[in-house]
Structure formats: C-alpha cells, structure tokens
Image (cartoon, grey):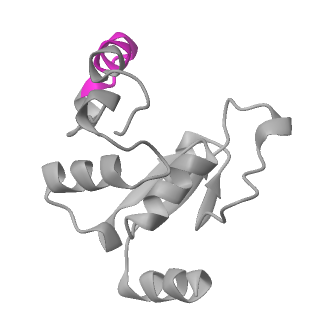
Amino acid sequence: MTWTGAAVVAWRELEDMGVLDLFSALVGFEDVTSYKPNPEGVNIALERLGTPPQETLLVGDSGAGIAAAQAAGCWSCHAIWGIPVSEHSIDSVKPDMVARTPEVLIGLEYTSRTSEIVQARRS
C-alpha cells in the first residue's frame, strides 16, 4: 500500500479495520522524497514485495495514484467506491480498469493475453 500520509497512521487504520494482514508492504510519505504522481512510492513497494510491475495491479482513488501506477509500469484500477459521483473523473489519466466495489477486484487473474491488451490500450 502506498499512502499519502505517515505509514504509522495507515498501519493503525488498517489494524482498526481488521485488514492489516492483507497488506505485505506499506509505504508512507516518510519513505519517499517525491510524491504521487511520481512513481517512487510504487517502486519502493514493488521492491519490498519483490514483484515485477507488469504483474502488479495498483488500485487508487485519485488521478495521482493512477498516474504513479502507470509511470511505474503497473496495471491501474480506479477505485470509485465511497467517492462522490462528482469526483469520479480523473481527466488527466486513463486507468486500465474501474472498480465500483471492492468485490470487483476479487478473482482478477493475470494472464499474458490481458497484459498484451493493456499494453495495446496504453499505446
């Protein structure tokens, strides 16, 4: 998880929600010198996870998060649940997918064919 605030705050919030164990890496503003849309935080998370960007889906609720994902070479998903409809637009970037609910993300599967489709869309 990349977070625009302090990692310790995110850690506490995730723990309070009972979902902390779902996150293997947490990157806060204290871990980076450049903030989203710069991909530095995403790249740090990828390094901590040992995961290649082309096999990584970054779910974000802002244009800056989507842009950071794309700059790092990751797949991007615009999460719009809990966001007022008036704020759904992220004009400056085009995510690879949009998720209206968290449940949409369950069962997504990476394949080389979907990677080819995403790369073609980005070109």
> Residue placed at 16% from the left, 55% from the top?
47
Magenta stretch in the rendered image = 11-20
Residue 24 counted in the magenta span: no
Query: Up-down: is 120 above or below 56?
Result: below
> Residue placed at 54% from the left, 58% from the top?
67
Relative placement, left or right, of 51 versus 79 is: left
The image quarter containing residue 83 is top right
> Between 33 and 88, which is closer to the camera in this rendering?
33
Image quadrant holding the C terminus, namely bottom right
Query: Up-down: is 86 above or below 111?
Result: above
Relative placement, left or right, of 23 versus 72 is: left
Q: Position of residue 100 (x, y in %)?
A: 68, 46
Majority secondary structure in the magenta region: helix
Tell me if residue 64 can be seen. Answer: yes
Relative placement, left or right, of 1 versus 76 is: left
The image quarter containing residue 25 is top left
Image quadrant holding the N terminus, namely top left
Query: Up-down: is 72 above or below 23?
Result: below
> Residue placed at 61% from the left, 83% from the top?
121
Residue 12 counted in the magenta span: yes
Q: Position of residue 60 (x, y in %)?
A: 53, 45
Q: Position of residue 6 (x, y in %)?
A: 33, 21
- Kindly give the residue lying farthest to the right in the view shown: 86
> Between 63 and 111, which is closer to the camera in this rendering?
63
> Residue placed at 42% from the left, 42% from the top?
35
> Between 4 and 22, which is closer to the camera in this rendering?
4
